[in-house]
Image (tube, grey):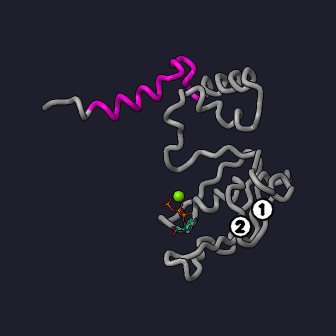
Amino acid sequence: MPEAALSLDNVSCVFADRDGKGEYVAVKDATLTVAPGEFVSVVGPTGCGKSTLLNVGAGLLAPSSGSVKVFGKPLQGINHRAGYMFQGEALFPWRSALSNVMAGLEFEGKPKAESEALAREWMKRVGLGALKTDTLIRCQVACASVPCWHKP
Ligand SMILES: Nc1ncnc2c1ncn2[C@@H]1O[C@H](COP(=O)(O)OP(=O)(O)OP(=O)(O)O)[C@@H](O)[C@H]1O
Ligand SMILES: [Mg+2]
């Protein structure tokens, strides 16, 4: 059997509660294994800890207890084997679509030409290749502006 791409073992996440006096257990003793190439959905009611669990897998949040392994190695800090699409819109609105896609590579210190080539390749792969780099941002501006200008 191949090594798990991600394994969470008895992971718990405890936060301060709303008044800051007590503790709130968002995730308790979660165990989950994801094989390479496996498609897994985590389903549950709002507030049950899905995003918290994903944040742990992405290395954005260290669990309060339990262990996280990526391809068999304990995860320390950011999971560089993971891509993460946030639940809410998380673009930099002042950047073009291309420079949003390049941002992660840029922050990792990759040379600009290499980042741009990779970003363009991925934009193509998700069907954005034919669009101008700033089309998405223009679209968002247009969507937000239309109601203000529309007169019934
Ligand atoms: N940093 C934090 N500090 C305190 N409480 C938090 C923190 N992050 C999450 N929580 C709480 O932990 C619980 C789980 O949150 P989480 O965002 O993981 O839920 P979810 O299952 O993703 O919900 P949704 O379906 O609404 O996205 C919620 O009650 C939330 O308020
Ligand atoms: Mg969520």
Q: Position of residue 126 (x, y in %)?
A: 58, 29
- Which residue shows up at 77% across the image and 62% down it? 68
Mark 1, mark 2: which one is toward the viewer? 2
- Which residue shows up at 50% across the image and 67% down it? 47
Could you tell me which secondary element the residue under label 2 belongs to? loop
Side of 19 where 140 appears, left or right: left
- Please tell me whether residue 130 belongs to the stretch shown in magenta: yes
> For mark 2, does the 10 Å Cα neighbourhood hold few (<14), some (14 to 19), or many (20 or more) residues?
many
Q: Position of residue 37 (x, y in %)?
A: 73, 44
Q: Position of residue 48 (x, y in %)?
A: 54, 68
54 vs 37, nearest the viewer? 54
Placement of 28 over or under 59, stated as above or below: below
- Residue beneath disc 2: 63
**Pointer 1 with pointer 2, Cβ within 8 A:** yes
- What kind of residue is marked 1? Val
Residue 84 is labelled as none
Which of the 4 image quarters holds residue 61? bottom right
Q: Which residues are magenta?
A: 126-146
- Which residue shows up at 38% across the image and 30% down it? 141
Earlier residue among tags 1 and 2: 2
**Outermost residue toward the left?**
152
Placement of 121 over or under 66, stated as above or below: above
